[in-house]
Image: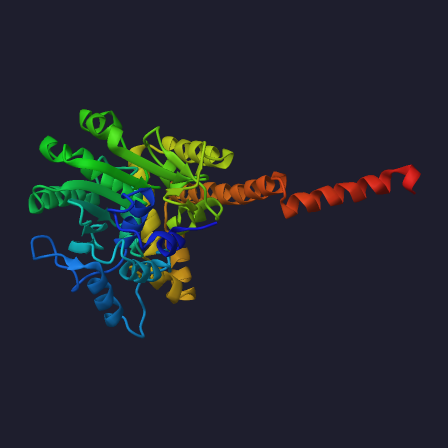
Amino acid sequence: MANILDYLNWRGDLTLAQSPFNEVDNLILAELSFVNFTGIVPGPGEGEGVPLHSAAEAFFRSHEGGDMGMGVLVPDEIPTLLRKMAECPRFREMKVNCFCDHLDVRKAEQFAAVTVELGDGSIYLSFRGTDDTIAGWKEDFLLGCQPEVPAQKKAVEYVKAMAGQYPRRKLMLGGHSKGGNLAVYGGIFVPLAIQRRISAVWSNDGPGFYGAVLETPQHARLEGRIHSIIPKSSVVGMLLEHEESYTVVDSNQTGLLQHDGFSWQVLGTSFVTLREVSRQGRRNDLALKEWVRRLPVDQREKFVDGLFEVLTASGATTLTDLKEDGFRAAGAMVRAMKDMEKDTRDALFNAIATLFRSNIQAAVEEAREEARSEGSPLRRLTELTEKIGRGKNDPEKG
């Protein structure tokens, strides 16, 4: 099976004039926003766009022999993706511009975006998903507690700014994970004149929305242009309220690991699709929704505050810090949990248990499906084991 890196090897020599923009191109550009283009790509209103190959050269030059700074949960393949994009005719001459990267640890705000000029008269606004920062993860959790989080507000402002900076361009919006949520939210709540210029919005396994966002007239106007893509056992993309119409893609991972866009399977110019999410995906959806419903909004916010007090007890600001601090961080977290109110502590343990059960069940489900599939080594082994068992119990073969 192939992924987006293989796609660049196979079809990267074809320009958009030869092969039109497709859903796989969308995911590639969504992942591009995880690259830190600070000091390389101009900010909004600061100047002309930079050819992608030039931006890539500058990025690798500034990180020569050092850490790429991707973080614990950001895919390690991002630098490889950037290198391949810079080498292939399909992407290398596209221009990147208006890079924005905002982080406020105290206020739990994390937002980043970059605009890509495709060269065909349209632009793709790529919104970064959750990165390595603990503040970013806290903001993710607050999506289930607040009608609007700061990153969503910034997404609307960013779309407005780009519509003004590129007054005659068609707009495409997209992102992976929280970036998908921001793309949809930004497209919904811009003025009508801007919304009419949006040709497509892509949410790549992005979480849904708190409250009645999907019931607004603004959403109704855009709904037909929103493309929601989730893996077969999606957890993140099924959180909160989301579009009922979505594309299910195959992944070579199980459970939560399917959130990684580099695990999504590609065939030609499309993803390998399935008719519906797996049984485990449906279980995840029901279990997590039920867990959220059981907690009133005020308790949810209390839970989020308590959880992130624990995570930052050692002074860590990123997941990498937590990993590197090791035992010191663990000790601080244990002490913080002891000071937590019992209801909040119980809610935390229940949330962790729900996610771990989902992940383990997904792995078991995948193994069963593999064992049932035609030509599977697991199926052949199962059949052989059953034959041996029948032979032992057959008195005529004793």
The answer to whether 28 appears left or right of 106 in the picture is right
Give the residue at x 31% y 66%: 68
Which colour style is shown?
Answer: rainbow
The answer to whether 121 appears left or right of 3 in the picture is left
Where is 351 relative to 39, above or below?
Answer: above
The answer to whether 228 appears left or right of 106 in the picture is right
**Image quarter of residue 361:** top right
**Image quarter of residue 284:** top left
Where does the C terminus fall, quadrant-wise? top right
Give the residue at x 17% y 41%: 171
Can I make out residue 213 in this image? no
Can I make out residue 362 in this image? yes
Front-most of 119 and 77? Answer: 119
Where is 65 relative to 50, above or below?
Answer: below
Residue 144: x %, y % from top left: 30, 37
Where is 356 relative to 293, above or below?
Answer: below
Front-most of 327 and 176? Answer: 176
Give the residue at x 49% y 35%: 278
The answer to whether 234 appears left or right of 31 in the picture is right
Front-most of 215 and 277? Answer: 277
Q: Count numbered badges in the picture.
A: 0
